Amino acid sequence: MSASHGRLADLFRKGTRYPIVRYGIVGVLNNLRGYLIYLVLTWLWLEPKTAVAIMYPVGAAMGYFGHARYSFSYEGSASYGALRYCIAHAIGYTANIGILYVLSDKLGFAHQLVQIFAIFAVAGILYILFRYFVFSNRPTSS
């Protein structure tokens, strides 16, 4: 096995020192699914912010276990992590709706493109919140 193959395999291994890569893998899979459903919902009948209001909690719930177990190897209390996860996603949801409102409603950009931008912007915000606030693996007080 070559050294480069070993480093590549290390990127996908649980517990590796590259949580941002694992976060990206979970995030890409989760967000691709969510964005495709968003496109279908807005194409069929829903207003973009309503579609986000429906899809955001579904995607967040599906992403919790992937991020807790795989992305950040979280070993803390499930209820403690879940509470902080909900707080982080409330911030992410607010940012997403704000981006759609400003860039699409006020400035007239196509909501499909704005939502792609919002996915990446919110992913950056959530990575920081997940890494240092939600899944930090710091000991919690009893």
Image: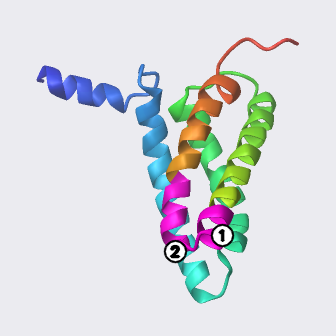
Q: Which mark is residue 110?
A: 2
Q: Is residue 9 above or below residue 31?
A: above
Q: For the residues marked 1 and 2, what is the alpha-carbon distance in whole angstroms?
A: 11 Å
Q: x, y percentage for residue 46?
A: 67, 82
**Percent position of residue 84, x then y:** 77, 33
Q: Residues within 10 Å of mark 1 (few under 14, many from 20)?
A: few
Q: Please tell me which residue lies in front, 105 or 24.
A: 105
Q: Decide which of 130, 13 is in the foreground and name it.
A: 130
Residue at x 61%, y 34% (from the top left corner): 68
Q: Nearer the viewer, mark 1 or mark 2?
A: 1
- Secondary structure of the residue carrying tag 2 is loop
> Residue 68, relative to residue 132: is it above or below?
below
Badge 2, how many Cα within 10 Å: few under 14, some, many 20+? few
Q: Is residue 101 left or right of residue 43?
A: right
Q: Left or right of 136: which side holds 123?
A: left
User: On the image, which quarter does residue 54 sit in?
Assistant: bottom right
Q: Which quadrant of the figure contains the N terminus?
A: top left
x 60%, y 47%: residue: 63
Q: Say which element carries label 1.
A: helix
Query: In the image, which residues are magenta?
Result: 100-119
Percent across and percent down for residue 118 are 56, 56
Give the image quarter of residue 131. top right
Report the residue at 45% width, 31% height from top: 20
Q: Which picture quadrant has residue 64?
A: top right
User: For residue 97: magenta?
Assistant: no
Residue in front for this viewpoint, 88 or 99: 99
Q: Which residue is mark 1?
A: 106
Q: Amino acid at mark 1?
A: Lys
Q: Amino acid at mark 2?
A: Ala
List the single residue furthest toward the bottom.
44
